[in-house]
Image: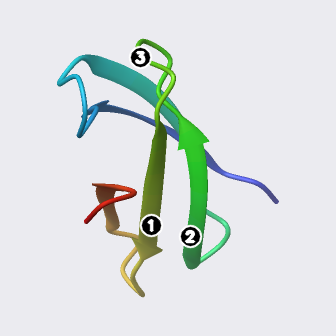
Amino acid sequence: MMELAERKVNCPYCGEVIDILIDCSVAQQNYIEDCQVCCRPITFDITVDAEGELYVLLSSEND
């Protein structure tokens, strides 16, 4: 069953707050998605630990 969590994060390029939806049924995720404001590519590293705690790390392509 897919569990979705909504998070507000800051774009590493323009600093704007963007809303993202995360599928919490997948423990480890890594993907690239463009910022909804400045359209630059953001790398998302997402981890859901054994207790269900969600960790979101964002980086720019130059990090």
**Percent x, y of residue 48:** 44, 73
Residue drawn at (17%, 24%) of the image: 15
Mark 1 or 3: in front is 3
Residue 20, placed above or below residue 17: below
Mark 3 or 2: in front is 3
The residue positioned farthest toward the bottom in the image shown:
50
Give the quadrant of residue 59.
bottom left
Circle nearer the N terminus (3, 2): 2
The answer to which of 60 and 50 lies nearer the viewer is: 60
Q: Are marks 1 and 2 in contact (CB under 8 Å)?
A: yes
Residue drawn at (66%, 72%) of the image: 26
Identified by mark 1, the residue type is Ile
Dot 2, how many residues are within 10 Å of its Cα: few (below 14), some (14-19), or many (20+)?
few
Give the quadrant of residue 50.
bottom left
* Residue identified by numbered label 2: 30
In the rendered structure, the answer to whether residue 31 lies left or right of residue 8 reads right
Dot 3, how many residues are within 10 Å of its Cα: few (below 14), some (14-19), or many (20+)?
few
In the rendered structure, the answer to whether residue 54 lies left or right of residue 13 reads right
Residue drawn at (58%, 53%) of the image: 32
* Residue identified by numbered label 3: 38
* Residue identified by numbered label 1: 46
Circle nearer the N terminus (1, 2): 2
Determine if residue 23 is in view: no
Q: Element type at marker 2? A: strand
Residue 19, placed above or below residue 1: above
**For the C terminus, which image quadrant?**
bottom left
Q: Element type at marker 1? A: strand
Identified by mark 2, the residue type is Asn
**Percent x, y of residue 31:** 60, 61
The answer to which of 44 and 6 lies nearer the viewer is: 44
Q: CA distance from mark 1 to mark 2?
A: 6 Å
Circle nearer the N terminus (1, 3): 3
